[in-house]
Image (cartoon, rainbow, N blue to C red):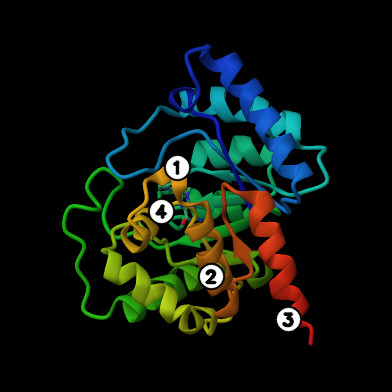
Amino acid sequence: MGIVNVTPDSFSDGGLHASAAAAIAHAEKLLSQGAHILDIGGESSRPGAEGVSVEEELLRVLPVIRALRDFPVPIAVDTVKPDVMRAAIDAGASMINDIKALQAPGAVDIVAASDAAVCLMHMQGEPRSMQLNPAYGDVVGEVGSFLGGRAAAAMAAGIGRERIVIDPGFGFGKSVDDNFDLLARLDDICRLGFPVLAGLSRKSMLGAATGKPVGDRASASVAAAVLALERGATIIRVHDVAETVDALGVFNALTRR
Ligand code: 8Y4
């Protein structure tokens, strides 16, 4: 899964049209590098980030979804807002990537009423404050029971199990140790019986392990991707698609034996 951000602050200052054009060009590049899914996001979910309105988020993501809908890969939309989910699905998105695991009022029903797939992610707290004081007794157990519970709620609302992906949410209300505990035991999360998505790309746990700044974490990200694959993850959300596709080729060559 290749990451496509459509946030004006990620690009210089050309406004919304330039942001959409840059995002579409970036998506084309990721596709040429071998991405199997594109994840379009119009609201930054980084620690400390401020939210945007439904209107602003739609102005960002809809032109990009419409431009990519005929590409030969599924389009996921990274949003927590039910109104954005509905409009994105109507515009051609086939997956909702929700860092709040469909907990917003109405979100489960909107996905249930569609054919879209959903990624249910674990987060402790809210993006603005989640990294201030993350605390767990047993991080793997707590994340697993949250994800199992959200998947059960999704299925009870009519979302078929074949439409559900789960994700431990690396970096979302977790200490460095919590993140590495989750990576070490990602096989436990896989045992819940749903495909597991791992988003480790360039995250601060990799900065902690390497001492490198965010712009120099590509190799660390590829290493983390392979470790996640080895523990059973089947979707890897990344910035560095070409490098990760090569690593996946090596992983698959070994795993097929
Ligand atoms: C550098 C670059 C440092 C990016 C941090 C980051 C996930 C996700 C994000 C994830 C799923 C991010 C939207 C955070 N992470 N969705 N989204 N899983 N499903 N931070 O792990 O990339 S945004």
Q: Which residue is mark 1?
A: 215
Q: Residue at x 28, y 71 (%)?
A: 177
Q: Is residue 20 above or below residue 3?
A: above
Q: Residue at x 42, y 37 (%)?
A: 44
Q: Quadrant of residue 255?
A: bottom right
Amino acid type for the residue under numbered disc 2: Ala
**Does the image show residue 128?**
yes
Q: Which residue is mark 2?
A: 156
Secondary structure under badge 1? Answer: helix
Mark 3 vs 2, N-terminal side: 2
Ligand 1: does it lie within 8 Å of the C-beta at label 3?
no
Classify 10 Å Cα crowding around label 2: few (below 14), some (14-19), many (20 and above).
few
Disc 2, disc 4: CB below 8 Å? no
Amino acid type for the residue under numbered disc 4: Lys
Disc 3, disc 1: CB below 8 Å? no
Left or right placement of residue 196 versus residue 184 in this view: right
Instruction: Report how far apart the C-alphas of labels 3 and 1 lie in the structure.
Output: 30 Å
For residue 254, which numbered disc appears in the image?
A: 3
Mark 3 vs 1, N-terminal side: 1
Point out the frontmost of discs 1 and 4: 1
Q: Which residue is mark 4?
A: 203
Q: Is residue 60 above or below residue 49?
A: above
Instruction: Report how far apart the C-alphas of labels 3 and 2 lie in the structure.
Output: 38 Å
Mark 4 vs 3, N-terminal side: 4
Disc 1, disc 2: CB below 8 Å? no
Instruction: Report how far apart the C-alphas of labels 1 and 4 lie in the structure.
Output: 10 Å
Mark 1 vs 4, N-terminal side: 4
**Does the image show residue 114?**
no
Left or right placement of residue 69 versus residue 58 in this view: right
